[in-house]
Image: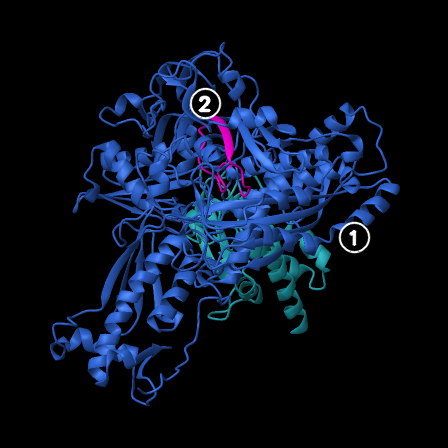
Amino acid sequence: MSAKKNITLNINGVDHHVQVEPRRTLVDAIRDECGQTGTHIGCEHGVCGACTIMLDGKPVRSCLMFAVQADGARLRTVEGLADGDRLHPLQQSFIDHHGLQCGFCTPGFLMLTAGVLEQEPDISDEGLIDALSSNLCRCTGYQNIIKAVLAAAADMRAAR
Amino acid sequence: MKPPVRETATNWVGRSLRRFEDPSLVRGDGRFTADVPAALYVRFVRSPVASGKIVKIAAPDHVRLVTAADLSGVKPIQPMLHKFNYVPVMQPVLADGVVRFVGEAVAAVICQNEDEAEDHCDLVDLQIEDTAPVVDARMAVGGAAAAVHAEAPNNVIVEGRVKTPECDAVFATAARVETVEVRSHRQNALPMETRGAHAVYDPVTRRTTLICSTQMPHLMRTAIADLLGMREADLRVIAPDVGGGFGQKMSLAPEYVLLVWLARKYRTSVAWKEDRRENLMSSFHSRDQYITLSGAFDAKGKLLGLSADILANIGAYSCFPTTCGVEPLMALAELPGPYDVRDYACVSRGVVTNTCPMAPYRGVSRPVITFALERLMDKAARHLGMDAIDIRRRNLVRAFPYTSVMGLVFDEASYAETMEMAVDAIDIPAFRRRQQQALAEGRYLGIGFAAFSERTGYGTPAFAARGMGITPGWETVEIAMDPSGYVEARIGASPHGQGLDTALAQIMADELGVTPDKVRVVHGDTDRTPYGWGTFASRSAVICGGATLLASRKVKEKLVRIASHMLEASAADIFIADGVAKVAGTDRALPVEALAREVYHHSHKFGADVGPGLSDSASYDPAGTFSNACHAVIVEVDIETCGVSIERYIVAEDAGRLINPMIADGQICGGVAQGVANALYEQIVYDETGNILTTTLADYMPPTAHEIPAIEIMHLETMSSATITKAKGLGEGGSIGAPAAIVNAINDALSPFGVSLDEFPVTPERIHTALNAASKVPSMTPEGARA
């Protein structure tokens, strides 16, 4: 254990001034210090992707970073995906295509694909499926997640 | 007599209604156990060895350590099974004197934050004197093995035997006796949310609330109160959002018992978040079985008799509440599957070893027995010179009700019809042509089938027949319409991803004549819901759905009486649909909420036949039903990499009436994905010292979106008399059929090499080993093509 550091985590546009040990993972700080529990922890070794968030616009595994590394960065979590009452197209598409069952992995899948689509709006369907294979889901068998993401990507492209 | 007036109503059952569960979950507003902060956090010190005596557990003074020595008065977990040969072994909440598997909780460390608790675990001085471990089930019964529990010197703690009088004679005179030896390796159900618990003591009420990731909140309350000597009324158990269970979260975690004990001791809130390593190592495992299965056939392929020897490795302890009998005894009872067979012999044993305890996992034994039976069918067909489909046609049960050789009564189903649907859809002749062409190019394609029955929605008789000390089965549902016309249903089932809130709302909407958005389902809180058994065994749509239907009818009947008074018409003429009560054939009508308002706030206007309030409850305890399906698969095996890719996956299934087809298909897809994992990828590995080698998701590898194929689903809806909603359960079927169908397809693909893969998962390593051992130069004709 070592001395705590003062850092600022900007989550969904809100600054959280927190004190964390340097060893504290980003996901732990987001959940415990900042109270944003929509980001989940599934494995803590970077395989399952349940903790995926966007850091400066890119999807990252928040269990593989220390909170101090995110000091000053712009973080976006699932809580920041909807625009008030209006769900993000991906959120609505997951509902419409039955892309979730227990819902535990869902925030990670949403932030992964939202991040990929922001980085690369014209990504091919194959590219999207490839990206989706970074995260694990145990309930759906993935096909409905793929349908949801492809449909949302098409809608988002059409709306541009 | 005037002709009946036809009124129309919206039907909600049968629609793919979007799930009510989803909006909060996609927003990240779900509440899971680990989301609740606590004053104290617990980490467990776990045994690093499989078998040994605890010589010393000590820690520096500043470490808050709890060991078995502190838990005097806490009873060990001792699940009961009323079988004469069941040995009721005991599992202490924390290891007491001896350890029996790697990962067993030996001590708990309590701290104000989790990281520090982990640091403190490293300061604990745990010394264990190793003893020789027993790891493999065959080794356990080999005679030379040490006893894992002194009470069971031969390590067999449950055994079932059955033999029909003519069985030996049938085998002695059969035209063909075929035998398969299959091995199913060990799996972890692997819910994406690991287990976890949060217990808080309330000094005002002196009650403790346990929030935990469970499929069975009421039974957790009973079990924990019993073990701690508490009044059950002093414990509230809440299953909040639960991130998948698949059976793993049915069983009582010793850790949950300790959390309640700690909350009461420290009079505060205490939390434990299982990490993935603990989940892989110490939660519950399943499917670790050897089966030797023989079939006696006549010359035309009619199955005359089956004889099985089943050995299930149940790990170090018997799980509560199902007991370790769940795998071996279900295998014994259901092995004959969907085939008509009149003679049967079976010995099925559950043996203890120094490995993580076994518990139910989606499908329980049926993925393994279906695998054995469907491998047997394929092999018998080949040796009898028959087509693999024809031999199944000859043997599938076709007349209902059918009483199996084990006395199970099969209700109306469509075993043959679903197989024909799958056969037609996959187009075998076209495939065989393609297979020949591929072979000429040095590519190996194969086709495989699995037909099976899935016993679902069974009530207390089935559990009593198994001899269980506790016989779950029935469910109770309480339905209350409030004065504003909104409906609350409080259920004993405990869904965790199955979409039951939505499906039950559809049933209630139809029965009560309201729209589903007026209905809310409350579950997973023992203070708010009637006692029930939870969600497992493909039971909720059938049993909780049935209770919902019965309770709705009672409330509806009262609504009709109220409307009859208020609309001054005969009850027989009242028609309630879409939120409106009307006198049939007239324009006299009242909204349902007006009826509700009146019966609460102006009950004096009604006679004694109505009475105040608008709520009722019902219970349902059915004998059970059988869903059925046939899976058909085309695979390609790359003989260079020994990788298997699934080209096409068809499921033709019959689960009776589909309440919500979208949810039903989702259950099938998810089940198949877990079956694919079982067939090809996932295996918990122990070395010979009992050390577990698969403790990360880099070693234990669940499939991703790349490995799971698109699944083509076809439905039949047989309306069975065995279930009042006409729905049969389907939660487990996907995982039951997949290993058999996929491995049959792999064997078909590799038939030019003359190999037989009867062990799963069929990893590249196993294929490589089999191909290396094959003496045969590949022939240019796949075996199936000869038939």
Q: Is residue B683 visible to us here? A: yes
Q: Residue furthest top?
A: B144
Labels 1 and 2 in the same subunit: yes
Indicate the position of residue B420 as horizontal and vertical percent values.
64, 53
Query: Residue at label 1?
Result: B430
Q: Which residues are magenta?
A: B338-365
The label nearer to you, 1 versus 2, is 1
Circles 1 and 2 in contact, beta carbons < 8 Å: no
Indicate the position of residue B602 as horizontal and vertical percent values.
15, 78
Quadrant containing the N terminus of chain B in the rendered view: bottom left
In front here: B108 or B630?
B630
Residue B91 as seen in the image, left or right of residue B281: left
Q: Secondary structure at mark 1?
A: helix
The kind of secondary structure the magenta stretch mainly shows is loop
Query: Residue at label 2?
Result: B351
**Which chain is in cyan here?**
A
Residue displayed at 16% across by 70% down? B612
Residue B518 as seen in the image, left or right of residue B200: right
Indicate the position of residue B266 as horizontal and vertical percent values.
24, 35
